[in-house]
């Protein structure tokens, strides 16, 4: 079985709900028609609309519930992967609005990366006081801060992922998630946003001390076999990023 056959096996029941329209894996030579200030103005308007939405309240109460469960009083740091081209796509724009609102509420430091960000988008993010990472770390990042929120919009709730495939395929295609699944507590977010694509399949996933205490010691030493993502996947490897840059 070649890689391509192997990874076509994870099928999504409702295509649009789970997989947005991203299939461009290389950074395009975009002619950026909007200036950085124009993009920021639009983001500010979108953020204002987002703040007025019932979904914002849903998100805040879920976050506060998660923090209370974890005995934490804030989100010190946010790491955001996979936001997408927010100067172009409405979903990404609303997701950025959500990120900015969370940052404001908790005065969090934000690190952000998407290999497809354009030059103007990077400038916008920096002007909005977000720290844009320069290296594609493929999400393999050591987190030392207990109150870190990893914000991966539209990357799907783990329980939904599990429902969409068989146990064997779940283990084969997303081995790290498969291993961590027994120790996670998922807080489902009701998607009551007026533009449902932006937050469909979004959940909060937390790791409580109680659950972590049940992890056997050799768990942390075991290294699951990582998958080779095929060309149809949305994931961009560090190698692919280097090729695009060079
Ligand atoms: C399924 S799209 C989601 C985009 C957007 N958040 C949405 O909801 O439409 C996945 C995003 O992950 C980004 N991505 C792919 N590889 C990545 C990597 N190694 N690190 C961070 N982001 C990555 C892609 O560029 C793309 O923007």
Image (cartoon, helix red, strand yellow):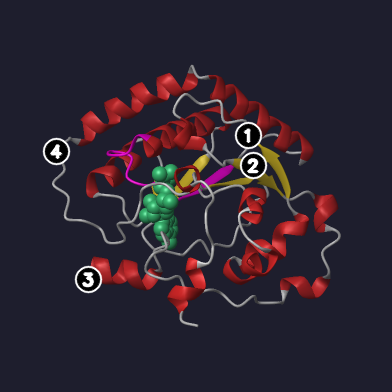
What secondary structure is marked by label 3? Answer: loop
State the mark number for residue 246.
3
Residue 204: numbered disc? 2
**Regarding mark 2 in the picture, which secondary structure is present there?**
strand
Q: Is residue 154 left or right of residue 34?
A: right
Whether the residues at callouts 1 and 2 have beta carbons within 8 Å, the answer is: yes
Q: Residues within 10 Å of mark 2 (few under 14, many from 20)?
A: many
Magenta part of the chain: 76-90
Predominant secondary structure in magenta? loop
Whole-Å distance between the Cαs marked 1 and 3? Answer: 40 Å
Q: Nearer the viewer, residue 191 or 40?
A: 191
Disc 3 Cβ-to-ligand 1 distance below 8 Å = no
User: Residue 33 — which label?
Assistant: 4
Cα separation, mark 1 vs mark 2, equals: 7 Å
Q: CA distance from mark 2 to mark 4?
A: 36 Å
* Residue 121 percent coordinates (x, y): 28, 43
For marks 2 and 3 on the same chain, the one whose residue lies earlier in the sequence: 2
Position in image of residue 13 (x %, y %): 54, 50
Q: Which mark is residue 189?
A: 1
> Disc 1 or 2, which lies upstream in sequence?
1
Which residue reaches farthest top? Answer: 52
Q: Are marks 1 and 4 in contact (CB under 8 Å)?
A: no
């Amino acid at each position: 079985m070649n890689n391509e056959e192997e990874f076509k096996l994870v099928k999504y029941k409702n295509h649009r709900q789970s997989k947005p329209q991203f299939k461009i894996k290389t950074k395009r030579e975009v002619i950026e028609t909007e200036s950085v200030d124009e993009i920021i103005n639009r983001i500010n308007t979108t953020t204002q609309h987002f703040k007025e939405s019932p979904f914002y309240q849903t998100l805040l109460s879920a976050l506060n519930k998660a923090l209370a469960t974890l005995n934490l009083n804030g989100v010190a740091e946010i790491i955001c992967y996979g936001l997408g081209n927010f100067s172009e796509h409405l979903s990404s724009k609303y997701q950025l609005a959500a990120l900015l609102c969370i940052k404001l509420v908790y005065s969090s430091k934000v690190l952000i990366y998407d290999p497809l960000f354009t030059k103007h988008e990077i400038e916008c993010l920096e002007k909005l006081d977000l720290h844009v990472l320069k290296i594609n770390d493929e999400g393999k990042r050591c987190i030392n801060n207990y109150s870190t929120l990893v914000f991966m919009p539209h990357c799907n709730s783990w329980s939904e992922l599990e429902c969409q495939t068989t146990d064997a395929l779940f283990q084969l295609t997303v081995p790290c998630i498969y291993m961590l699944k027994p120790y996670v507590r998922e807080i489902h977010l009701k998607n009551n946003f007026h533009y449902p694509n932006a937050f469909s399949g979004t959940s909060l996933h937390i790791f409580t001390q109680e659950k972590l205490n049940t992890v056997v010691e050799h768990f942390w030493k075991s290294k699951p076999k990582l998958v080779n993502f095929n060309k149809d996947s949305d994931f961009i490897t560090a190698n692919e990023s280097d090729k695009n840059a060079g």
